Image: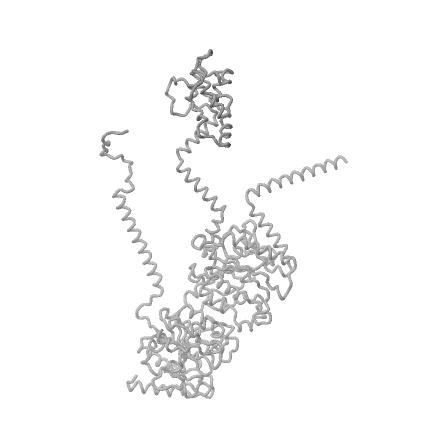
Amino acid sequence: MSLSRSPSPRRGGGWASPGLTSPYENVSGKSSPRKTYGDIQMNGSASATGENVTWASAKARSEEINGYPSFSTRNNGFFSRHARKISTSLPTFSLGGRRDFADKEKLGRGRWPPIAGSRTVRYLQRTGRVAWRFRLRLGIVLGLLLAYILFYATPLHRVYRRTSWLGGGSKYVVILAANQGGGVMEWKGPREWAIERDSVRNKKKYAKKWGYDLEIVDMSTKKRYAHEWRESWEKVDTIRNCMRKYPQAEWFWWLDLNTFIMEPSYSLQSHIFNDLVANTYRDINVYNPLNISHPFKSPHLDAVARSPTGNGRKDSIHLVIPQDCGGFNLGSFLIHRSIWTDRLLDIWWDPVGYEQKHMEWEHKEQDAMEHLYTNQPWIRPHTAFIPQRKINSFPMGACSENGEDPKIHYSERDRDFLVNMAGCEWGRDCWGEMYNFRELSNKLNRTPWEKFKDGLSDGFRALKARFAAKKEEDEDVKS
Amino acid sequence: MHFALPPRKTSQPPPYARASRSSPIRRKQLQVGGLLACAALVLIWLSTYIFSTSSEHIPSGTPEVVIVTVLDEATMSQDYRDRIIENRKYYARKQGYATFFPEVADYEIGTSPRSWAIVPALRHAMTKFPKSTFFFLLSPHSLIMNPSINLKSHVLDAKRLESLMLRDKPVVPPDSVIRTFSHLKGDKVDLILTQDNEGLAQGSFLLRRGEWAKFFLDTWFDPLYRSYNFQKAEGHALEHIVQWHPTILTKLALVPQHLINSYGVDIASRGGKEVMHKEGEFVVRLVGCELDSARYCEKEFDQYYQQWKALQNKGSI
């Protein structure tokens, strides 16, 4: 590179070197060398032209690295060049002023700058420092929190609840008897459809929540049975089919259609099975509406058969049934897969018993079960009873001869698990009851946020009503 | 800081210093701890194993078979009863078995036929002999003619039973659609029955103690069967439950009649000469003598009793 002439001193100091400056301008397309905010302030308007280059300013500029010369290979692309232009054209602030002087005292170096903020700033800084000191523990806590949120936000919790060796949900099957007596015998109206829809949805939600299997069985009087002897005794066959269909499951919960799970937040495990012995009673004398004499007195039986509570152990319970005011109630009961159960299901229906009793046994399997329990000693040591309101609360319409009974009827305050609208098809309004209980269940199981919102809207409504009443009063007074 | 030589370690370590994770002492502690844990686990496993099997443990000296014969004060003379007891006891002493002679009056059978008493009597025997394995029900109107027969090797042994079992045979002759299972293991059998030309014989059979036996007896004794007026009372009830309930049929083995149920009288409808008692056979049963007013059980019994006594005096049995 040759200069057209030798650099010559200028009047204002410095020198002019057109050969050095012109290529910059041609390549970068800038009209003037870049200046920092400080420079402009310091040098005023003189430096704007770019001609007034002093030694001091050039040195200062080269000390603050402002970028690379434009003739380098960088910033050749259109985008990068313009992007760089935008960023460089933004003003920079150096609030501390130009630090071209030496610090006088060096005592505060390397420490936090003196606290100049308000109290909240100081407080924030202190918490920040504490958090930093406990960063490991804090990290663990935050990690756990994140894991917890992820567990419930994703289907992971459902997998957990279902797995047999974790939550154990796959060990339970809910059998819902839909379409009872329908089919050939009678057509369903819109109300029956609504009942079925609500009931099924309720159980589906519950089974999904806890990882149980739900088996909806069609109990309509089938052609296969309609002309046959054992008409509508399908309960036994159904349970046996379910046991075959779910070979991993252990407990089967039979539910009639006219039932509603009021508290889906109760799992079967926590509600009943974790402490099966405490949640059930083996001795029927605790509540004995049928007046069955218990235990057997006859000395020809063994000790377990003569004991009022069997062997008292959890693993000997294979059938859990509630009792209502009229005896056993099989609208909601639990049965366990076992050899004992196979035998029970095998003899539950017998042609000789059926032939003698089918006119008398209005409730079919239920009466047959009562008969077996009363007469066959091998049944009792493996049968347990569960207080009715644990799995089978009644609405006020059922068993109401003696008024409200705290053993039988649903209590909102105790948050009973399930309502069985037993016998509603005989002169009561099934759909009405189902609807009311559904709404009540929704109301009882609102989230806190929903409760808050409802509380607000209720409050407004009350206020509004009061104002309206007052206004009316005033108008009355006026008139 | 860097020195030419590493700084010397102090010979008195600070008291709060803990052993480093890989120090030899620590490793030793871990080893010992691990061994102790393993030992504890093994102990727990062993103890559960022992305790779980202890309920099935049968003390030595327990009679393996109990012979159950239900007597009836109301219809049998004292002399007759004594002879029956003598016959059973003699056999039991020879083979180390136990005997049990309950009375019909011990059980509440209501208005049903007195023959139903055999069902609660068996349940009673199981209560009285809770460790014995097999219960041999033998009708009173019968005699054990060959006391040298050991029931274990005669029928009860699993292998022997498998070779004797009548498979795929109509449960009730001649042509019941329900047939005995063709694939049944000897050790799964809980009830060993015979049948004659008329049906299942409930006068002489073997039953294994267990939960199944309780279920079977209780089901058999259901009041609805007793009130049903089966023509042959408990016999027909037995045929009924065997045919209608597969959980009972799966435990049943039919064996040839002469093994435990030879007849002492020639009745054409019951099989005639073919099933008559032959020398050396185990039992002779005077089938149906208590129901037929033309026959006298004690008289028929006496004939075989003398025969049995003669053999006994000869020393051949």
Q: Residue furthest top?
A: A11
Q: Position of residue A270 (x, y in %)?
A: 47, 52
Q: Is residue B277 left or right of residue B29?
A: right
Can residue A329 be seen? no
Q: Where B224 falls versus A157 (above or below)?
A: below
Give the quarter of the image for residue B281.
bottom left
Q: Position of residue A289 (x, y in %)?
A: 54, 62
Q: Position of residue A338 (x, y in %)?
A: 45, 63
Tell me, what colour scheme is on the image?
Answer: one colour
Q: Is residue A111 left or right of residue A452?
A: left
Q: Where B317 falls versus A241 (above or below)?
A: below
Q: Where A61 falls versus A163 (above or below)?
A: above
Q: Is residue A129 left or right of residue B10?
A: right
Q: Where A357 falls versus B313 (above or below)?
A: above
Q: Residue furthest right?
A: A479
- Is A42 or A258 nearer to us in this picture? A42
